[in-house]
Amino acid sequence: MDADPPDHSRATECLALLQEHEANFVDTSQASAYWNAVSFEYFHLAQASAKKGDTSVALAHVGHALVFAAKSSYDVKSDWIPYIEGTKAYLEGDLPALQKCMNRCQENRVVLQRLYKGLRQRGVVSYNEDYYQDL
């Protein structure tokens, strides 16, 4: 929903809109897509916080993203959950866990590889720098 602004400045607004209409989706054939969208917006909130250097808030949002991704039976879940878990491992500074997630991730593997490279080189999280670096 908020993919257009690179800073994910609309994520809060999009999440609030989704939550406002939750009753319209839960226990329907659209529930899986709904939970995936909620997960997506929480992940964008995590990214926005990580880019600002607020790792603890980013980790809280990543936790929510994982909870709602698990509720979805969407096919994207097969790559989405390892991507979220890899981002969590990065934010926690856990290189072995990040590497395991990279191996399970196809679509977003390059992003996780960038995060891994930066964390391995510096030993500290710098999401804004690592997310955009070249491999």
Image (cartoon, grey):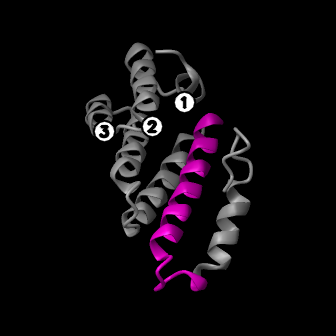
Label 3 or label 2, whichever lies nearer to me, is: 3
Magenta residues (range): 23-52
Within 10 Å of the Cα at label 2, are there few (<14), some (14-19), or many (20+) other Cα atoms?
many
Q: Which residue is mark 2?
A: 91
Q: Is residue 63 above or below residue 21?
A: above
Residue drawn at (59%, 57%), measured in percent from left and top? 41
Residue drawn at (25%, 35%), measured in percent from left and top? 100
In which image quadrant can residue 97 be found? top left
Residue 101 badge: 3
Q: Is residue 121 above or below residue 107?
A: above
**Residue type marked 3:** Cys
Quadrant housing the N terminus? bottom right
Q: Which one is nearer the viewer's eye here, 27 or 96?
A: 27
Can residue 53 be seen? Answer: no
Of marks 3 and 1, which one's residue comes earlier in the chain? 3
Residue drawn at (51%, 59%), measured in percent from left and top? 39
Q: Is residue 96 above or below residue 26?
A: above
**Residue type marked 2:** Leu
Q: Is residue 8 left or right of residue 70?
A: right
Q: Secondary structure at mark 3?
A: helix
Residue drawn at (58%, 24%), measured in percent from left and top? 132
Task: Find residue 135 and report its horizontal and vertical position in percent.
Answer: 46, 15
Asked if the magenta segment contains residue 25, the reply would be yes
In which image quadrant can residue 108 be found? top left
